[in-house]
Image: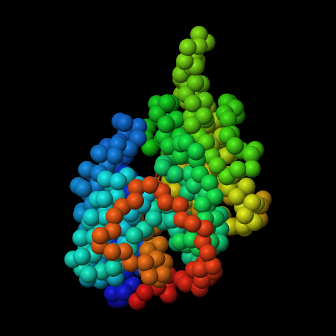
């Protein structure tokens, strides 16, 4: 028999996945339904915001219904409604928020606003099943490549980010250049299996510099020039054979991953941390996971990567709402979305209280 105060419904619609999940206070996931829009965006090689919002409108209620049905619960069984309100595409976020507000109003349940980036890293906490803070956190997705010093599950200190393309965006654009399908990450990973990662020596931007920033747009352009030739050049361009595509994919992936892993190593050292959390779509990449494991072994650090099914966007990682509820964060019904990323100020002395004492199991009853 499920206790009424033990369950929350989480809703995710920040980009191009419509998600709903039912999560127990002990962080066990009773259902996690995701409706992907990949097919709709494939021919554009990236997410088209207007198409994404319209698809969310079509999918949101069926997805919520299915999440409740799979978990075998009714709205009456829930104790809170959580929804991602930032960052993301404004139209997409609004669809999820409107659904969540309507449910909260109809049921008189508390509404909890979730930050999508923090939720990506919370997937690592869910997988671990124990406190994993403080730690360095890397969120590496289609929209973000951000490094944080995570003092607690909701207490993030900004360390740095990409100054141009996000890593996942670079995977998507390079896939498009090479004629591979969307989303590009899994397609590049697959093609790279048959390629030589040393065939092309692509740039590793900022790798040797002591700065916690990334840049992937030069790498993407370097692949473009190798694939299609340098504009205005009379040099003949070799045919883009399957082997050349595989070599370009493998060499691109090696360069991107080396920088991502290198910056994690730098952040661990600079902040004197011994735990690393990695979440977001690119963290599903097997070669990346292996390289991270190797680096952490050498650094004598613990690695916590989100499980593959919780790397790409999903609502289950909205379980972070239990932490927020424990801290008393209930949102008003006139809550709005915040499409851009808001950098929180450095955590103050409250940090110890949040990272140490409170666990989701102590959350509201
Ligand atoms: O976290 P996510 O689902 O959405 C955002 O918040 O952006 O991440 C999607 C991104 C896409 O750019 C996709 O190409 C990338 O994650 N991705 C991967 C892999 N699977 C997804 N990148 C590299 N290797 C993968 N296996
Ligand atoms: Zn995401």
Q: How is the image coloured?
A: rainbow
Q: Residue at x 46, y 30 (%)?
A: 179
Quick one: quadrant of the C terminus?
A: bottom left
Depth order, front residue of 182/53: 53
Q: Is residue 193 left or right of residue 211?
A: left
- Total tally of numbered discs in the picture: 0
Q: Residue at x 27, y 75 (%)?
A: 104
The percent coordinates of residue 30 (x first, y second) are 39, 74
Identify whether 356 is placed above or below 57: below
Which residue is depicted at the point 68% across and 56% down? 264
| Residue in front for this viewpoint, 264 or 19 | 264
Residue extending furthest top?
Answer: 234
Residue 285, relative to residue 100: is it above or below? above
**Above or below: residue 357 compared with residue 72:** below
Q: Quadrant of residue 321?
A: bottom left
Residue at image point 47% right, 83% down: 326
Q: Position of residue 155 (x, y in %)?
A: 57, 71
Q: Position of residue 320 (x, y in %)?
A: 47, 72
Residue 181: % across, % down: 43, 37
Position of 91 compared to 162: left or right?
Answer: left
Left or right: 206 as drawn, with respect to 231:
right
Quarter-wise, where is residue 28 in the image? Answer: bottom left
Q: Nearer the viewer, residue 234 or 186?
A: 234
Q: Would residue 347 be found to the left or right of residue 95 on screen?
A: right
Q: Is residue 104 visible?
A: yes
């Amino acid at each position: 028999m499920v206790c009424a105060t033990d369950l929350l419904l989480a809703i995710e619609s920040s980009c191009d996945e419509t998600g709903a999940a039912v999560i127990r206070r002990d962080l066990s996931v009773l259902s996690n339904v995701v409706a992907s829009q990949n097919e709709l965006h494939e021919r554009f090689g990236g997410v088209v915001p207007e198409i994404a919002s319209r698809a969310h409108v079509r999918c949101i209620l069926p997805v919520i219904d299915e999440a409740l049905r799979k978990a075998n619960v009714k709205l009456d069984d829930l104790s809170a409604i959580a929804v991602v309100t930032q960052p993301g595409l404004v139209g997409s976020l609004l669809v999820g928020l409107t659904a969540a507000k309507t449910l909260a109003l109809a049921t008189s349940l508390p509404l909890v606003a979730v930050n999508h980036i923090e939720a990506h890293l919370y997937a690592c906490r869910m997988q671990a099943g124990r406190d994993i803070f403080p730690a360095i956190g890397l969120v590496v997705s289609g929209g973000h490549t951000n490094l944080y010093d995570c003092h607690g599950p909701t207490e993030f200190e900004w360390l740095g980010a990409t100054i141009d393309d996000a890593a996942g965006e670079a995977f998507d654009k390079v896939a498009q250049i090479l004629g591979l399908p969307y989303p590009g990450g899994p397609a590049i990973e697959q093609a790279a299996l048959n390629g030589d990662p040393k065939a092309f020596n692509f740039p590793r931007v900022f790798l040797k510099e002591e700065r916690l920033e990334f840049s992937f747009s030069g790498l993407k352009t370097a692949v473009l020039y190798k694939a299609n030739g340098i504009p205005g050049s009379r040099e003949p361009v070799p045919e883009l054979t399957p082997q050349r595509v595989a070599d370009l994919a493998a060499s691109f992936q090696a360069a991107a991953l080396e920088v991502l892993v290198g910056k994690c190593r730098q952040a661990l050292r600079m902040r004197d941390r011994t735990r690393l959390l990695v979440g977001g779509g690119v963290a599903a990449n097997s070669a990346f996971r292996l390289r991270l494991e190797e680096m952490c072994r050498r650094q004598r650090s613990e690695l916590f990567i989100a499980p593959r099914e919780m790397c790409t966007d999903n609502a289950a990682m909205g379980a972070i709402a239990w932490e927020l509820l424990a801290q008393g964060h209930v949102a008003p019904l006139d809550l709005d979305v915040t499409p851009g990323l808001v950098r929180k100020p450095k955590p103050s002395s409250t940090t110890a209280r949040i990272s140490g004492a409170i666990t989701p199991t102590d959350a509201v009853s």
